[in-house]
Amino acid sequence: MISTDQTVDSPPSALLRLKGVCKNFGTRKILSGITLDIPAGKVTVIMGSSGHGKSTLLKLLIGALQPDEGEIYFEGQNLCAFTAEQWDAYRLRFGMVFQSGALLNSLTVGENIALPLREHSRLSESIIEKIIKIKLELVGLRGFEDLMPDELSGGMRKRVGIARAIVMDPQLVFYDEPTSGLDPVTSAVIDNLIQSLTEKLGITSVVITHDMKSAFTIAHQMAMLYEGKIIAHGTPAEVRKCDDPRVQQFINGLPDGPIPMNRSKGSYLEDLFGMDEPKMI
Amino acid sequence: MNLWRSITALFEYLLCLFRLGLQCLYWIAIAPFEKGRRPSYRSTVHHLVFAGVNSLPILFLILLLVGMILAYNSAYQLKKLGIMSLVPGLVGVAMTREIGPLLTAIVISARVGASYTAELGTMRVSEEILALDTLAINPVRFLVVPRLIAMVILFPLVMTCANCVGMLGGMLVGWLNLGLSPEVYYQYTFDNLVQRDLTVGLIKSFFFAVIIILVSCHEGLAVIGGAEGVGRATTRSVVNSIVLVITANLFFAAFFFLQEQWI
């Protein structure tokens, strides 16, 4: 076990570094040997089909799960050896945008965004009000402070989620499926927002998605997860040129190829008729 | 083997409640000095209103009816002995020592505990609890502690009011059917009621409040399995709260009885 005061020689631009990360749920291997550098000030897209470990990887990065093997380093410090105080300090340095927005339904939009400020800062209410307006303006929703989350559309909830994630001016923002379930226009708005936050505020973004249009629009670096392993990694152009048929099938959205659509278990005939072959009468 | 597994599961469950209780104690008594973080005043007031003020009508109705039932039933027996004058005392003592705390606990666990479990469970399913974690906001401090403080404050208050309403129910029966005027009923009640009866009820009310909040919040925070999981947790929350409250009541009954013997 590497202690927190031990650091690794990560490249100066790598904000997060995963080294041989493995995660199992019971006997099921979810992630096996993930090694990846996430550069500072860039958008890194982690893509892959459902059930191949994207969300588990994200949960490891935000500290909701601990890896069974391997280490994750944030600015050279091992997350696995963090104390509760170090976790709190780390959490204040990243923001998380959930797939559903995960806004607190009992609070208004403004109160949701103000929550981290009220909890972790001693700013006056008038300053907090101003920060709420600034962050809502960034996501194009100023004037919606007094609405309840239930009164917002899916896209608006995600944008409020982004405003809440960046309210503490984090270095790093994680996005879980930011464009899933949204119409093309709202998806494009969210993509623009992620790009502009990275470019204007220098925020490092890690985006988990299987929306290929969005991924190729925003990514500086991409990694594709397949059965818990990274099978392609590089710039969008490099990934597009990758000759792995699984990558090509995935990024082109082809129904036929090495990635099986059918994940049924056991023999179909046996399931239907209780035998290997139907009896010929 | 199944019995052994059940006993182990029971102790594990009680251990989880104990751990949650310790965490609450830390955030109430230690963290304000260590970390300068006090429990939310606004949230506590919100829960005082939701769990306390809004519970009063149903609680008053039930205690009024039970007070009347108790008066009729005690009168039915005491009439044979010709000591109807003991009805007010019996209703008063039973109300303050046993029926009041127990029925308040049952009503509060069904009305408030179930709602807390469903609310926290839904928050867990919709990733709101995880969102709090990622915002470095401890869910126990933010969600459980204000509910616990509110419940510990409001339970004795609503229970005392409900006890009065219960005794009022008895007084109504005494006046209408037993030939005891309200003045006489009042006099007989307070002739038999002693300070100790009130203290016993208040001590119980503190523990019942803690049990209801720990069970309902633990069940809510531990929900797995989506909407169905929330439903299951809510049922478990009410059932477990009631069973634990009644079990605790038995221990209190035995404890106070034995204590009175020693005195």
Image (cartoon, coloured by chain):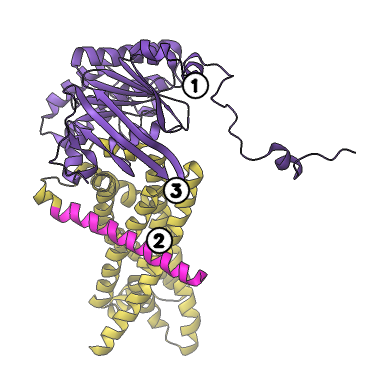
Chain colours: A purple, B yellow
Near mark 3 (Cα within 10 A), the count class, few <14, some 14-19 or many ≥20, is few
**SS majority, magenta:** helix
SS at circle 2: helix
Q: Do labels 2 and 1 share a chain?
A: no
Q: Which mark's residue is nearer the viewer, 3 or 2?
A: 3
Between A25 and A99, the one nearer to me in the picture: A25
Q: How far apart are marks 3 and 2 (CA)?
A: 32 Å
Between B88 and A162, the one nearer to me in the picture: A162
Q: Which residue is found at the position 19% from the left and 30% from the top? A: A93
Chain letter for mark 2: B
User: Which amino acid type corresponds to the residue marked 1 in the rendered image?
Assistant: Arg
Q: Residue at label 1?
A: A246
Residue A73, x across and y down, in percent: 22, 34
Q: Residue at label 3?
A: A26
Going from N to C along the chain, the mark reached first, 3 or 1, is 3
Q: Which residue is found at the position 32% from the left and 75% from the top? A: B252
The part of the image, by quadrant, that contains residue A275 is top right
Q: Return the residue found at the far front.
A: A243
Find the magenta span and give its range: B1-30
Residue B254, x across and y down, in percent: 34, 81
Q: Is residue A279 left or right of residue A76?
A: right
User: Which amino acid type corresponds to the residue marked 2 in the rendered image?
Assistant: Ser
Q: Which residue is found at the position 56% from the left and 20% from the top? A: A257
Q: Do labels 3 and 2 share a chain?
A: no
Q: Residue at label 2?
A: B241
Near mark 2 (Cα within 10 A), the count class, few <14, some 14-19 or many ≥20, is many
SS at circle 1: helix
Near mark 1 (Cα within 10 A), the count class, few <14, some 14-19 or many ≥20, is some
Whether pointer 3 and pointer 1 mark residues with C-beta atoms closer than 8 Å, the reply is no
The part of the image, by quadrant, that contains residue A14 is top left
